[in-house]
Image (cartoon, rainbow, N blue to C red):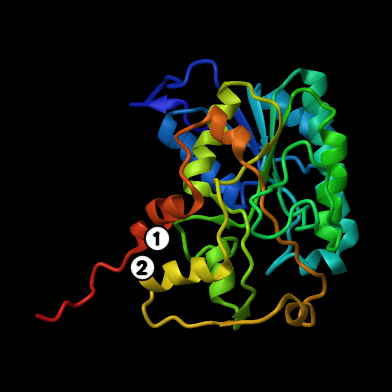
């Protein structure tokens, strides 16, 4: 069923010429995309086919007749990416076979594909040291395969980037205003007893997801570091959470070496250069400003008692 076609009970598309087919309905990005489309009056439908089943993708496209396709599906694991270490075949089917299937079908149909991928394919190195401001660019190939999730994502990007109709968005540590959602980076780290203290690039979905729809409208393609300019440490995120949401919140730090002892796979840390995205969309806010405006201010406790 196509959503967004009705206005006052009459079939009347509000965004003429646009019709989106979205995969990843149950994920945070896919779910948010549907809400944005509804708000903008863009007709859309969620794909019912499984990405690893090529025929079902062809059927979805025939039924929906989309102008653009969005892939927000994929195996990221629950509660986190360690799941992929123990479910490698399922991860391959979704992150590699499925992603390639959809890119190939869209290419054959001449359809633009917006692919929400990840920036968790890079780790600070001698050319990109911590605190240097030398971020990884869209021209850099993955230098990190320490987790199976990252390995599949780096592998598939190298292949999918050859399709001229695909726009690859490298999302990183997504922050968004629903602090109860299990995919929210804030929800994750507030549930940890200890966190590392390393600067990382991050994506404020409330600000950048609408921009991804604008990228589709402009038919932009290629690889994009889909992060707000600048970096934040876990501590800086938790400090904002404490200051705006829970003044009693506390946490402890530990080292990367200590962290590795409690994980099935190590985690990467990086700074992604967002110059390309900022040039196309100069209104994008730096990461801390964006996090405050779109995430923490809307969640600011309004019932604090002020003593006279």
Q: In which quarter of the image is the N terminus?
A: top right
Query: Mark on residue 244?
Result: 2
The residue under label 1 is: 296
Residue 296 drawn at (x, y percent): 39, 60
Q: Viewer-proximal residue, 268 or 55?
A: 268
Q: Which of marks 2 and 1 is nearer the N terminus?
A: 2
> How far apart are labels 2 and 1 at the CA level?
6 Å
Residue farthest left in this picture: 308
Residue 104 drawn at (x, y percent): 84, 29
Quadrant of the rendered image containing residue 45 = top right
Q: Residue at x 14, y 81 (%)?
A: 307
Residue farthest right in this picture: 89
Q: Viewer-proximal residue, 101 or 162?
A: 162
Q: Is mark 1 on a helix, strand or loop?
A: helix
Is residue 7 shown to the viewer in this render?
A: yes
Q: Which residue is drawn at 66% across and 81% down?
A: 254
Q: Residue at x 50, y 51 (%)?
A: 287
Left or right: 151, with 211 as reference point: right
Q: Is mark 2 on a helix, strand or loop?
A: helix
Q: How many labels does the image show?
A: 2
């Amino acid at each position: 069923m196509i959503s967004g076609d009705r206005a006052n009970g009459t079939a009347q598309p509000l965004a003429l010429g646009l019709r989106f087919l979205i995969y990843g309905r149950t994920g945070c990005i896919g779910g948010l995309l549907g809400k944005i489309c509804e708000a903008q009056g863009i007709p859309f439908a969620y794909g019912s086919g499984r990405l690893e089943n090529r025929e079902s993708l062809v059927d979805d496209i025939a039924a929906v007749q989309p102008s653009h396709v969005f892939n927000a599906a994929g195996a990221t694991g629950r509660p986190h990416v360690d799941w992929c270490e123990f479910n490698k075949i399922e991860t391959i089917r979704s992150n590699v076979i499925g992603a390639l299937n959809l890119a190939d079908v869209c290419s054959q149909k001449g359809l633009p594909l917006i692919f929400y991928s990840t920036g968790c394919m890079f780790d600070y190195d001698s050319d990109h040291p911590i605190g240097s401001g030398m971020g990884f660019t869209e021209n850099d190939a993955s230098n990190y395969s320490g987790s199976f999730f990252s390995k599949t994502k780096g592998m598939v990007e190298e292949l999918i980037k050859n399709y001229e109709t695909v726009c690859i968005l490298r999302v990183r540590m997504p922050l968004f205003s629903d602090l109860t959602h299990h995919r929210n980076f804030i929800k994750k780290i507030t549930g940890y007893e200890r966190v590392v203290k390393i600067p990382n690039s991050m994506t404020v979905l409330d600000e950048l997801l609408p921009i991804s729809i604008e990228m589709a409208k402009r038919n932009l393609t290629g690889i994009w570091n889909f992060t707000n300019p600048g970096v934040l440490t876990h501590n800086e995120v938790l400090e904002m959470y404490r200051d705006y949401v829970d003044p009693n919140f506390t946490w402890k730090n530990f080292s990367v070496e200590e962290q590795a002892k409690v994980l099935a796979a190590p985690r990467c840390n990086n700074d992604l250069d967002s110059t390309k995205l900022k040039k196309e969309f100069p209104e994008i806010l730096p990461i801390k400003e964006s996090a405050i405006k779109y995430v923490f201010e809307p969640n600011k406790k309004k019932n604090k008692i002020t003593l006279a």
